[in-house]
Every structure is written in C-alpha cells, then in structure tokens.
Image: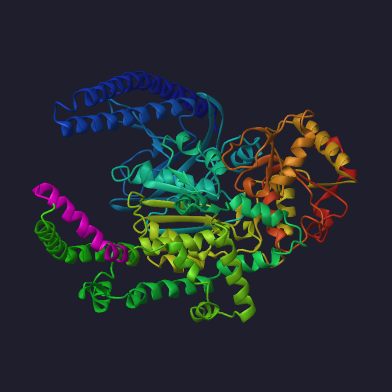
C-alpha cells in the first residue's frame, strides 16, 4: 500500500464521518418529531377513542409507532457507523461492464450508507449480496447473486481496516478471506461480559450458513468455540435484512440453554442495528404448562444438580437413572404414541348411553359416530363439541319437563303468581335433570393426569403398548417409580416432556403462527420427544438448529442426533453444515480439551494462537485448596483479563468455595439462571457456564471422586472449553483418570508453574 493510498483512505474516512454527522443531526430531528407525534397519537387515542372513530385512531397510532421505530433504528445505525463506518473494501469489476475504466470500490460496514442528494452508495451493508464476496473470495475471479442471476467479475483489491471511534488505527491489503492478523487480534482480546458481533471476521464456512436462503431447515454442528451462536445471531440479522418487508424481530424466536446465556448474547443484534428477538428456554415451556397442574416440577438445573451431586451409594439412584433412560428413549415415545392412539380411537367406545326417563338422549353408537366425525379435533375439543350436541338434544326435554312442572304446581293451587310458578318449575326441572347433567359433565371432562397415570397402573396393559425389550421386573420398576412420584404431586424433569406432549396431543398444540424463524441453540441436549413437541408448536416456520454432541451435559438422557432430528422434522429443504475449526481457545488449551474426548472423536482444527499449557494443581485439604484459589485469583487479576470463571461441577461446590472466599476476594456466585453474567470473578456451576466464554477458567475438584465416570468426560470437556487464554484444574487426593490418562505433555503441574509462564 502506497502513501498515496493511505492519504486517500484517511481523507475518505474524514469525508464519510462528516456525512454521517450531518445525517445524524437531521435524523435526530426527524426521530424526535416522530416520537412527539407518537406521544400525541397515544394521548389522542386514550382521550378521544370513546367519542371518535376508534379504528381510525388505532390505525394512526400504529402508523406513527412504525415510523418512530424506523427513524429510531436509522439513528442508532448512524451512531454505530460514526464509531466504525466500515471494516473492509473490495474493488470489483464486472465481466459484462467492459466500458468501465476502473473497478467499483465497495466499502463494507455493519450497515449501509447512502449520500442523500446524489444517492451514491458509500458503504454497503455486510449482508448485501455484493458484500458477501468479501467473505467468500480472495483476489481473483468472484461472483455474487442478483435478481438477474449470477454476476461474474474480478476482485483486484481486498483491504481491511481497524477504525475505532472514527479514527483509523490500521489498514492493510489482504489476499486471504479474512486476514490472520485480524482474526488473531480479535481472538487475543480479553473477553467481555457480553458477546459481540463478528462481522469483521466472519469466516468462509460461517458465511455459508449465515447466508443460506434456499433451505427451510439448517442444521449446524461444530466444536466448542466454532462460532455457532454467533452464526445463529448473524443469520437472524441476515434474514431480517433479506425479508424486511415481511418479517420483523417479533417473528423470530431463540431457544437458549438458559436465561444467563440469553442475557450474554443480548448485545449482538443491537450492535448490527437490529432489535433483539424474543428468547426463551425449553424449560420455560415446561414450567408454564406444569403450573396448570399445580404440581411440584423439577427444573432442569435442579435435575442436573441432583445427578451431578448424588453419592453413588444413594439407594434410588439406579432407579432414577433407569427412569431417565426409559422416559427419554424412542421406545417410550412410540409407546406413548400408541397409548394416545388407543385413547383417541377407543376411549369413547366404552362410554354408556345417556338415558333420561327411559329415553335415550345419546346412544353408545352416537359416541362412536361423533368420535369419527370430529376426529380432526384433538380429544378434549372433540368432547367439548359432543357436550354441546348433547345439550342441544336435551333442550326439548328440558322445556317439556318445565311445562310438566308448571302444570303440577298449578294443579296443586299452592301458588297463583305466574312468575313464581315458572321459577319453581325451573328449579324442580333442574333438580330432576341434575343426575344426567352430572353424568354428561363426567363423561365429557377428562382428568389428563389421571389418564396419564392409568398407563402405569396395570403392568400387563403397560407392556401391551410397549414393543421394546423390557422384562417384568424392569416394567414394575418403571411403573412403581412413576406412580410414586405422581401420587406425591411431584414431576421429575425427565417426565415433564412426555407429560407436556401427552397434554398437548389431547388438548391441541397452542398456535405459534407469528413465529416464522426458530433458532435452537445447544440442541444436542434435546430428546426426540422434545423435537416432536417443537415440530407441533412451530408448524410453519424455518429452523436453524445448532449444537455439538461432545458438549452434551446430561449423563443419562437419551438425546437425539441431528440426522434423527431431521427425520423427526421432515425432509423438506434440509441442509447440514459441519464446522471443523475452533476459534476460542489457545492451541494449548484446545489440544488439551481435544484429548479429553474419546480417540475416535473427530479431530478439530485450531487457530494457531499460542498460549500456555493448562495447569494442574494439587492441594492436600480444603483450606489449602481455598488458599491456592485465592492466590491464583489475585495473581490473575494483575493481568489484563476481564472475565474469570471458577467452575464447579455443582452449585453446591460453588457455594462452598464462595463462602470460603467471602471477605478475602470479591466474587459473584451464580447458581440460578435468572442471574446475569458480568465481568470480574464469577463462581458458576458447569451446567450454567454452558455457551459462555471466559478469559481464564479455574475448574474445581478435577479428582476421581467428582470426575470418574465415562459420562463425566463430556462435562469436563464442556467446562474446560469455556477458557480462551488460561486454564487451571485444581484437585486434591487423586487426579481424575480422565485427565491422568491423556498425554502428560499436554498440561503442566502446578509445581512447574511460575509467574513468568503467565
């Protein structure tokens, strides 16, 4: 790059900043006027709606609300552009544009910028088709898609910039898709308490997922640190850009692993100039439903806490594990489906005829006839329709009985007031009809919990619906275990999804028609039945599903792989992407984490960012353990790291360490997912740390007592992969065999660790 080039770029940046500042001033005035107009519309609506045309007032209000939102969004985008107008440039010459003397200079930023008078496009939005070439091609032949087809051409220059608060920090020309120096600079920074946009460093394979427009269902597998969540968020921004006229942020839903994670990713979309989209968790779906039953439902966090903390000598642990494995299996899904089919087709066949005074109001044949005619409705709504029909058939009998009662009262000559006679007749008729009315209510109202419980009350019936391999003893164990906790009004976590599915199949799944795009993060922890529930809830939307099988946190639950999930959803326009590179951790941490997985596990590519080996530290007792943690934390705080995590396997472990450190060093304890993650020292259990990343991670109790089973391997892997720059593993007594069995060259012991290593 010549001095002339540098001068040109600096002058252009100064010109762009001035244009942005001018547009900001104008946009601020327009935005303020729009907000004032909206306030006046609200006042008019509440003050005048009773005496005016309410529909017209509401239309005006909605129009002004929409305009205010547009201007506010534009103002925020301009504010972002003023700080960092663009991060890349490509010079592109179209093949068909042979008359052009020079290629077009395409500057790329988080949002587009147009000169208002000349309509010259000064900055291209990173989501535009032209800007996509920046991520997909180096210098040389390139193309992009347009409404007229593929536009071929040649990229003669590719340049990258670092602009902070309107000041050029550096710029350089690049032959690579995203220059290593830029990526290394981004990855080497200290982690923040919130996830941020990666628009300046999106990699080729990530860009293919983000810009996929042709497939309704997109599945993305990738190792820890491969950018899956960032991809999902940038894909949302891309979809909002592509379909601005037909969707908005309220038409997209993210299913996150927990609310801490939802808060952690909440800055990404606003940084790109988009509104945040709704977030929820699958556990929220469960808890909202279980509340209707007035049952004590175990949350996912309490469930994992129990399984991680329970002593192996606990009497009912084996029974609990058997129940978890059975209730999350495909065999049980099929069994539940058969039982639901039986209820749907056969329950009403056993219903008796409804008879009043030797007159058949509704015969046994009628139950079958209307059950068939209304089979398109779920059973509960079907029974409600039948109940209405029976009431219609009762009306002539009720009128006839009232007339009869009026005659009887009149004949007795006890009353002469006509109004009183009619009232007494209604009361007498109602009393006489009470028995048949009660019968109708009982037959057309179902207690779903009792109906679900009935499946487990008779072992022979239970086995009649089951096609898997289950002997009499195993059957008795499952049935007794289920009936015991149902009778206590308690629902274990593994039962919540089957009960939810059972409830909604009979009641009808609530419509979620407003959701056009569904994003499921950390989907490796979902069961087949949970996917079935989501398929029935979100029937007419596109899906992006992301996860990593190696980070499955549940040691016993039978979760679903993405190929099986695809079969559950259907095969209409499916795409599978496998990311193979991790960008989060240093080479040393990544190599150590990779070794924790079984040898047959697919290898992960690394970014060659050099750091220090993970450090394994042994102490002799709890007091020396806490002293060592305190010393390490004080040492780490002298270094340029902003986020430090002390991760225990359980919340109980975390609470003990937090209590011991209290008054010695400032820490924040997170044990519930309604808390927020912030910079500093966080003490957090493994299942809440999922999806987060930290500069430094201290893993507690990496000994044989706490990490000894094969099922613990993925938990330890997930915890260790939270670390970006430093990883410490603390234990006393005996080091976990999961660690001691791997190549000792991949880590170092604390005795050999000195401050110079840091």
Quadrant for residue 125, please give it.
top left
> Observer-nearest residue: 101 or 246?
246
Q: Is 125 above or below relative to 20?
A: below
- Left/right of residue 708 with respect to residue 226 in the rendered view: right
Coordinates of residue 273 in the picture (x, y in percent)? 42, 34
Q: Is 52 above or below relative to 204?
A: above
- Residue pictured at 24% horizontal, 63% vertical: 433
Write the start and end of the magenta stretch as one range. 415-439
Q: Is residue 564 visible?
A: yes
Q: Is 717 above or below relative to 162?
A: below
For the C terminus, give its image quadrant: top right
Which colour assignment does the render follow? rainbow
> Observer-nearest residue: 410 or 256?
410
Coordinates of residue 422 in the picture (x, y in percent)? 13, 52
Q: How many marks?
A: 0
Q: Is 171 above or below relative to 579?
A: above
- Residue pictured at 67% horizontal, 67% vertical: 319
């Amino acid at each position: 790059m010549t001095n002339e080039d540098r001068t040109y770029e600096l002058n252009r940046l100064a010109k762009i900043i001035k244009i942005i500042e001018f547009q900001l001033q104008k946009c601020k005035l327009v935005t303020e006027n729009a907000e004032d107009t909206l306030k006046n519309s609200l006042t008019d609506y509440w003050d005048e709606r009773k005496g005016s045309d309410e529909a017209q007032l509401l239309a005006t209000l909605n129009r002004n609300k929409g305009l205010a939102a547009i201007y506010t969004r534009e103002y925020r985008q301009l504010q972002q552009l003023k700080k960092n107008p663009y991060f890349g440039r490509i010079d592109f010459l179209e093949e068909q544009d042979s008359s052009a003397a020079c290629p077009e200079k395409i500057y790329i930023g988080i949002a587009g910028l147009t000169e208002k008078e000349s309509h010259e496009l000064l900055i291209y939005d990173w989501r535009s088709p032209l800007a996509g070439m920046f991520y997909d091609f180096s210098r040389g032949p390139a193309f992009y898609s347009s409404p007229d087809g593929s536009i071929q051409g040649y990229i003669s220059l590719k340049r990258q910039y670092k602009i902070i608060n309107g000041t050029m920090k550096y710029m350089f020309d690049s032959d690579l898709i995203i220059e290593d120096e830029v990526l290394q600079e981004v990855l080497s920074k200290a982690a923040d308490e919130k996830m941020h946009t990666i628009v300046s460093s999106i990699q080729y394979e990530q860009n293919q997922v983000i810009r996929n427009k042709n497939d309704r269902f997109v599945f993305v597998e990738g190792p820890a640190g491969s950018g899956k969540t960032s991809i999902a968020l940038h894909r949302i921004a891309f979809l909002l850009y592509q379909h601005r006229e037909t969707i908005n942020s309220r038409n997209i839903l993210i299913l996150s692993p927990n609310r801490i994670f939802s808060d952690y990713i909440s800055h990404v979309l606003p940084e790109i100039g988009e509104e945040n989209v709704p977030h929820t968790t699958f556990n929220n779906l469960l808890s909202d439903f279980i509340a209707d039953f007035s049952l004590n439902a175990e949350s996912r966090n309490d469930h994992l806490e129990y399984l991680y903390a329970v002593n192996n000598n606990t009497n009912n642990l084996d029974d609990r594990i058997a129940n978890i494995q059975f209730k999350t299996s495909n065999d049980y899904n099929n069994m539940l489906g058969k039982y639901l089919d039986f209820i749907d087709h056969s329950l009403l066949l056993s219903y008796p005829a409804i008879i009043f005074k030797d007159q058949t109001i509704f015969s046994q044949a009628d139950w079958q006839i209307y059950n068939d005619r209304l089979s398109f409705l779920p059973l509960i709504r079907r029974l409600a329709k039948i109940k209405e029909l029976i009431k219609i058939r009762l009306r002539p009998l009720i009128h006839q009985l009232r007339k009869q009662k009026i005659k009887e009262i009149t004949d007795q000559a006890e009353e002469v007031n006509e109004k009183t006679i009619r009232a007494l007749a209604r009361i007498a008729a109602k009393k006489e009809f009470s028995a048949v009315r009660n019968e109708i209510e009982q037959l057309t109202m179902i207690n779903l919990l009792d109906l679900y419980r009935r499946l487990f009350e008779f072992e022979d019936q239970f086995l009649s619906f089951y096609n898997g391999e289950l002997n009499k003893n195993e059957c008795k164990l499952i049935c007794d275990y289920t009936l015991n906790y149902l009778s206590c009004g308690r629902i274990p976590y593994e039962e919540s999804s089957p009960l939810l599915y059972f409830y909604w199949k009979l009641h009808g799944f609530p419509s979620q028609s407003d959701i056009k795009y569904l994003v499921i993060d950390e989907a490796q922890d979902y069961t087949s039945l949970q996917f079935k529930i989501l398929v029935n809830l979100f029937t007419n939307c596109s899906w992006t599903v992301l996860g990593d099988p190696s980070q499955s946190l549940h040691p016993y639950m039978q979760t679903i792989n993405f190929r099986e999930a695809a079969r559950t959803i259907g095969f209409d326009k499916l795409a599978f992407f496998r990311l193979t590179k991790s960008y989060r951790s240093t080479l040393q941490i990544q190599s150590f984490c990779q070794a924790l997985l079984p040898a047959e596990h697919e290898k992960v590519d690394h970014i060659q960012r050099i750091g220090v080996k993970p450090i394994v530290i042994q102490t002799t007792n709890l007091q020396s353990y806490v002293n060592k943690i305190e010393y390490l934390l004080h040492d780490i705080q002298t270094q340029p790291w902003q986020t430090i995590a002390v991760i225990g396997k359980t919340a109980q472990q975390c609470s003990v360490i937090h209590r011991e450190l209290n008054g010695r060093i400032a820490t924040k304890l997170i044990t519930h997912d309604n808390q927020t993650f912030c910079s500093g020292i966080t003490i957090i259990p493994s299942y809440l740390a999922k999806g987060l990343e930290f500069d430094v991670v201290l893993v507690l109790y990496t000994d044989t007592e706490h990490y000894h089973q094969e099922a613990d391997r993925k938990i330890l892997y997930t915890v260790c992969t939270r670390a970006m720059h430093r990883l410490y593993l603390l234990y006393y007594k005996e080091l976990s065999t999961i660690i001691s069995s791997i190549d000792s060259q991949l880590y170092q012991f604390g005795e050999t660790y000195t401050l110079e290593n840091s």
